Amino acid sequence: MKRLLAMLLTVVLVCSMSFPAYAAEENKEQDVTAKYIVTATGECRAEIKNGTATADGVTVTGAPTNAKTLVVIPMEGEALTWVDGCVDGEAKAAYDIHFLDAQGNRINVSGVSVSVSVSGTDLVVSSVTPSGTDKSLSASVSGNTVSFTADGSHYYVIYQKDGGDQPGPGGDTVTVPIRGDENEIHADVTINDDTVELHELDFDEIDHIVGDHVNTGIVEIDLTELDEDITKIELPMASIKHIVEAAEEAHNDTEALQIDFPNGSVKLDDKALRAIIDTVGEETTVDLVLEPVETDRLNNEQKAAVDDLTVYGGVEVYLLCNTTSIRVSDFKGGVATMYVPFTLPEGVSADKISVWHIADDGTKEKMNTSYENGVLTWEVGHFSDFIIATEKSADPGTDPIEPTEPNLAFLWWLIPVSLVTLVGSGFAIYWFVIKKKTWADLVAIFRKSKENEE
C-alpha cells in the first residue's frame, strides 16, 4: 500500500512540475505579419544609393531621402497606345516612373533629374497624368540620351513631334532647340505674330549646355524651323546672365550667344552680352530684332548720302529693353556679327557687294563685309540700320561711259617719227628696188666714206 501511494505521489509531482514549463513556452510566441506584394508586368526595380538609381535604361538622380527603391514600368500595348494619343507626336518610349519608401508606399518623382536611353531625332518629353492631361517638359538630348526634370506626374513619354503641326502665330507654345557643342535642350517658347518669347531657362539646363566640355564657343538658339515671318525674339535677361556666368565659372571657351532667325543670324560675343546685362539689368527682358527693310525709310540726308551707291536692300537690327523702351546700341567694345542670306544681282561680283551703315545725319560707314555660300557677313560694335549696296564707280553697267578729250600732245612725237619712217622707206625702195643694190654694196660705200674722212 505504501509503495502504491508513493508511486501516485510521484506521478502527481511530475505532472505539477510540467505545467510551469508549458506556460513559459507559451509566453515565447510572437506575432508574424505577412505582406503580399503585387508587381506589374515588365516592372524593374533598383535600390537607391546616394540619391541615384538606374532601372531598365532609366537613371534618376536627386531622389529624396525617404525614397528607397526606384520603380520603372515601361508602357506597352494598350497603355502605350493610350499615352501616345495624349501627345502631339509619335511616342518612342513611355514609362511609369516612381519611388517606393521603406514601407512600400508610392512616391511620385518630382524635381529630380531623369535620363532615358532612347533612339530618335527631334525628341521632346511630356508628362501625362492618369486623366490624360499632358504637359511639355524642357528636355536636353545628348546622343541617344534624353534628360529632363520630372514634375510629379505618373507617366512620362518621349516622342517625336509631328513635323506637319508646327504652330504658327497666335500665342502657341512650342519648343526650340538650344545647342552648346554636342548637348542640346528643347526650350519652351511662345509665338505671337512675328515675335518668339523665350521662357525662363532652368539653370540645370543651362549648365548642361555650358559646361567644361563645351568646345564650339557658341550657345545657339535655333528658330530656323519656325515661320519665316519671325523677326523678333524676347530674351529673359536672367537666363542670359546665367549663360555668361556659367561660361565664366566653367573656364571654357564659350564666347558668344547666337540667335538663328528664319532669315538670318545675330551673334553676340561675351563682352557684348556683359555690356547688355550691365545696361538693362537682369530683372527684365529685351527684344532682339533682325528684319529686312526697304530703303524708302531713309530720310533726306540718308538718301543724299547713298546717291553714289546702287542699293539692293536694307536690314534693321536693334535691341530694345522692354522695361525702359530704350534701344541698347553701345556694346562697350563687344562685337555683334550678322549673317544675312543674299542673292547676288546679275552681273555683280561678290567682291563688289558691301554692307553700309548710314547714320541719320547722312554719315556713312562701309562695313568689313564678306560673302560666301549665299550669306553676307559683317561685324559691328553697335546695332542700327544697314543697307546692302555697291559703289556705282565699281558697278559695271550702272554708269554711262563719258566721252574723253583727245590727248594731242603725242602728235608732236608722231610727226618726226613719221617723217623718218617715210624717208627711210623711200631710200630703201630706191636702193634695193630701183638700183638693185645689196647690203654689201651699201656697207662698202659706208666704209669708203669712212676712209676718206680719215
Image (cartoon, helix red, strand yellow):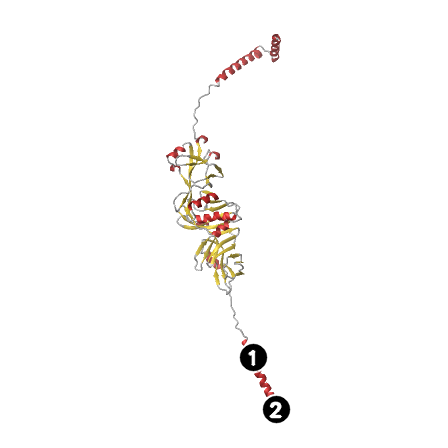
Write down the residue under mark 2.
Answer: 2
* Image-based side of 112 in relation to 432, left or right: left
Q: Which mark is residue 115?
A: none
Lower position in the chain sequence, tag 2 or tag 1: 2
Q: Is residue 454 above or below residue 357?
A: above
Q: Position of residue 253 (x, y in %)?
A: 52, 45
10 Å crowding of disc 2: few (<14), some (14-19), many (20+): few
Q: Nearer the viewer, residue 175 or 42?
A: 175
Q: Nearer the viewer, residue 340 or 164?
A: 340
Place residue 391 in its image quadrant.
top left
**Contact check, label 2 and label 1, Cβ < 8 Å:** no
Seen as rendered, the residue at the extreme left is 300
Is residue 79 shown to the viewer in this render? yes
Question: In percent of the image, x 42 and y 51: which residue is there?
Answer: 173
Alpha-carbon distance for marks 2 and 1? Answer: 31 Å
Question: What element does badge 1 sit on?
Answer: helix
Write down the residue under mark 1.
Answer: 22
Q: Is residue 194 above or below residue 308?
A: below
